Image (cartoon, rainbow, N blue to C red):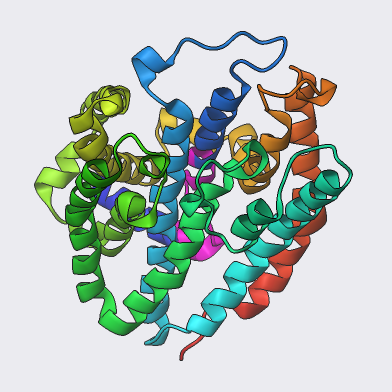
Amino acid sequence: MKIQEAYTTTIETNKATGKIPSLDGLRALSIILVLLGHLSGTRNLPRFKLERWLGDYANLGVVVFFVISGYLITSLLREERELTGGISLKQFYVRRAIRIFPAFFAMMGVLIALALGGWITLGSRDIGYALTYIVNYQVNPPWNTGHLWSLSVEEQFYLLWPWAVWWLGNRKAAWLAAGVIAVSPGMRILGWLLWRGTAIGDLAMFPMVADSLASGCLLGMLRGWLHEQKWYLRMLRGPWMAVMLVLLFACNASRVYTAGAVFGRTVINLLLAMMIDYCITNSDNLFGRVLNATPLVWIGTLSYSLYLWQQLFLNRHSTWPVCAFPINLMLALAVSTASYYALEKPLLRLRKRFAAVRV
């Protein structure tokens, strides 16, 4: 199948099933990277020696989530405008709230109960940062809420980007996303100059990481146009993707150096956007069939709950028996599965009632 034909088929599949091919499989690979990073060094399991070759692969998994999120949200907003002539911000936020809040607040309720019982250490400030989605601005958050920095970034993105698309229109919003990508390295340089060697210098503040989301946003806006460009279609062929994968991990491994930390992330984001497009477009090739296989799709479906709950069990600093391998991984999977089927899946049916409508 030619790439342009594959693009058309992808759009038709999206409209028919409500799912974009390969995204669940990509989410699965992302959460697997996070799980491997957090499993490393837990009781009964030696610390993996992969950072030298791959860099911070757990963080890379989160960055993949960011790029996917930017692409998915932008595609939904763009398609809503094309189909209905407008964007309903009210419907957007209702759908996001139904999707995100129940599982999140259930997890926070358990953490608060454990803290009150003296099982974990969690102060009122920690709870406040978590509940208001500003953990990415908290200095030295505790382990059990530290992973919520990425969800905080996502929520800040949801607050800003839909309004920008609604207000600016698709074309100007695409320019805004490109501008964020261009400016973010400067923000990282500014952070390095102002806060180098301080605790705040390590925070994932929104301006320093927004280009990961913006790269996905730009793909969501320009994918149709890009698939009309011969040079881009050539880049979506297999040999180039192998080169990009090697370059991706090389950039990720070099992020410990100043130039790699500042500019390497931009390269990583753009490479990930192209690789995500490759996986969506070529969902019928061997790699695409693997991504869309039932086991990976299932893990990808659980990825949000897995990300929420894994931190409690995959704690290399804890002496709890439940944090020892392999019990920790089994419990993380079990609790995440229960969360998905008890909370997320039933509410997905409610979410369908708030389908996109014209403003």
Residue 40 lies, in percent from the top left, at 59, 18
Q: Residue at x 74, y 50 (%)?
A: 340
78 displayed left or right of 25: left
Q: Quadrant of residue 102?
A: bottom right
Residue 327 lies, in percent from the top left, at 80, 21
Residue 107 lies, in percent from the top left, at 75, 51
Nearer-the-camera pick, 302 or 285 = 302
Q: Residue at x 63, y 69 (%)?
A: 97
Q: Does residue 20 show up magenta in the picture?
A: yes
Q: Residue at x 44, y 68 (%)?
A: 76
Image height check: is 142 above or below 132? Answer: above
303 displayed left or right of 335: left
Image height check: is 301 above or below 79? Answer: above
Nearer-the-camera pick, 73 or 153 = 153
Q: Residue at x 54, y 62 (%)?
A: 18
Q: Main secondary structure of the magenta part?
A: helix
* Residue range highlighted in magenta: 13-26
Image height check: is 320 above or below 223? Answer: above
Q: Quadrant of residue 93?
A: bottom right
Residue 146 visible from this viewpoint = yes
16 displayed left or right of 241: right
Nearer-the-camera pick, 244 or 43 = 43
Instruction: Identify the image quadrant of the N terminus.
Output: top left
Tally the numbered discs: 0
Residue 242 visible from this viewpoint = no
Nearer-the-camera pick, 170 or 205 = 205
Q: Can you name the residue that lies furthest to the left here?
A: 231
Residue 35 lies, in percent from the top left, at 59, 29
